[in-house]
Amino acid sequence: MTPWITLSLCSWLQLALGQGIPDTDPPSFVPDCEGDVLFLTDSSGSVSYYEFSKVKTFVGDLLRPFTFGPQDVQTSVIHISTVPALEFPFDQHSSGEAVQQAVRDMKQRMGDTNTGLALSLAKEKIFTDQAGARASVPKVLVWVTDGISTDDVSLPMETLKEMGVTVFIVSTGRGNYLELSQAASQPSDKHLLFVDVDDLPIITKELRDSIIEVIRARRLKALDITPSSFQLTWPRLLSRDTGYYVVEYSPVTEPWKKLRMNVAGEQTGVLVRNLVPGMKYNVTLIPESNEQYIHTQNIQVTTLEDQVSPAQILISESNSHSFQVSWAPTPDSVMGYQILYGPLPGNSVEMIEVDNSRNRTVVDNLLPNTTYLVTVTALYRSGQEKALSAKACTEEENSRVRHLHLEDLGNNSLKATWDSADGEVVGYRVRCRRQAGSSSLVSVAPQTHSVLFTGLSTGAPNKICVKPMYKNKAGKGLCRMARVQAATLAPSYPIVQPA
């Protein structure tokens, strides 16, 4: 008794025992699958029109429950004939309706049964990027044959299997069992099916389940990972009416700190927040279906190491009684900031608290002409604290020049006069920036409040700036612009003249 007759009799026995029932009521959809499935259909003259139509119905029924698209299942069909012909590439149809219509529209090509040429086409042109195949997903070849081939299939089939393609063979005729079992993936009893063409519905569910085992995807993924969060995504496994998801996550080193989230069945993702930077988490997706069992999925996700904050401090807008403190960066994992400040030398310290939405604050009610030590401390959600310090100085009270007056004395000369600045001034620094010619800078004693500049260009603008100098720093200067006119009279009073 040949293997085909034995298996055909077994099919009849299965039917008699209530087993192997035709797949007349397939599931509405098959979840969690991702792969490229190529059908090699015998379209030669050795196949009758009736047999070809039965194979088309078989292919359509086999594919009916799958979800199609670039992130799900893709399928393609090659006709075996004298010259193999591609019916449609992997990336042409991205919906179940389009796939079913394309299968119904297939026409028999007739000709010789050159299966080896069709396999070579699959290897060289179809399982490629150009035909829409994806390098990162499982690949399946389903060869439906009447058992006859007019050329050699062993070498191209072996090459496909070496590429990682899983080969299923469905023989509807009296093919050579030894040759077909060698061509199929191993073990052959799980990848080679003999059945009469009228009994194809009997094996549809069995073959589909075997394909699912190959292309079942573990596609729970983590995207947009930050120090304190990550985005989980997964394929459509449920719907609003068929159940919901449970997401569980916990630190790998502290599994007892497990947290749970319930997610509606129509959703395919969720944002997990308030995590510890630089921590590895175990994540589990549990589909709670009220129709069928769906496997849980597990991944590990490590949050990013946190940015060090503060990494820099800037002191600005300083005056005699206040200054502004700014810092950066401001990562999400920081709950808030503490600003400590106190005069140097000294032991008194004040504190300001700032929430994590701000990166600056004004420190006021300070002493004039005083150096302060400022420390910015970041308070992290993990309980860690990081600090950075800087020095800031307040100005002398009213430490600026007032009422700067410029007088044109003729003979290309200009006199600058100002009122004294407050505080313990140790001198003044006066600068003349000429539009034409070199600049002049002169320092004068604290009791001197005027300077004469000579040799200025007639009609050209000149910028005069006066700045008070204190023991530890300079005060705020005052500037004015002026032009001089030519004159013949010389000044008759003493002046301080720059070198």
Image (cartoon, rainbow, N blue to C red):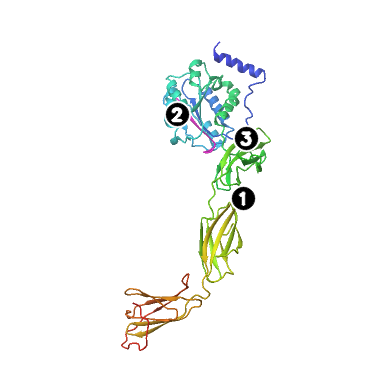
Label 3 belongs to which residue? 296
Front disc: 2 or 1: 1
327 or 427, which is in the foreground?
427
Label 2 belongs to which residue? 122
Q: Main secondary structure of the magenta part?
A: strand
Which corner quadrant of the image does residue 485 belong to? bottom left
Which corner quadrant of the image does residue 350 belong to? bottom right
Label 2 or label 3, whichever comes before in sequence order = 2
Kindly identify the residue that appears in the image at 65 percent across and 32 percent down. 293
Instruction: Establish if 238 lies above or below 362.
Output: above
Q: Secondary structure at mark 1?
A: loop
Is 366 situated left or right of 149 in this image?
right
Q: Distance between the Cα atoms at labels 2 and 1?
A: 58 Å
Residue 77 percent coordinates (x, y) = 49, 30
Q: Secondary structure at mark 3?
A: loop
Quarter holding the N terminus?
Answer: top right
Query: Would residue 478 be visible to someone looking at this image?
Result: no
Residue 47 percent coordinates (x, y) = 49, 21
Kindly identify the residue that appears in the image at 51 percent across and 73 percent down. 396
Residue 97 percent coordinates (x, y) = 56, 36
Q: Secondary structure at mark 2?
A: helix
- In the rendered structure, find residue 383 and report the number of the disc placed on it: 1
Amino acid of disc 2: Ala
Q: Residues within 10 Å of mark 1 (few under 14, many from 20)?
A: few
93 or 400, which is in the foreground?
400
Q: Which residues are magenta?
A: 69-81
Q: Distance between the Cα atoms at labels 3 and 1?
A: 33 Å
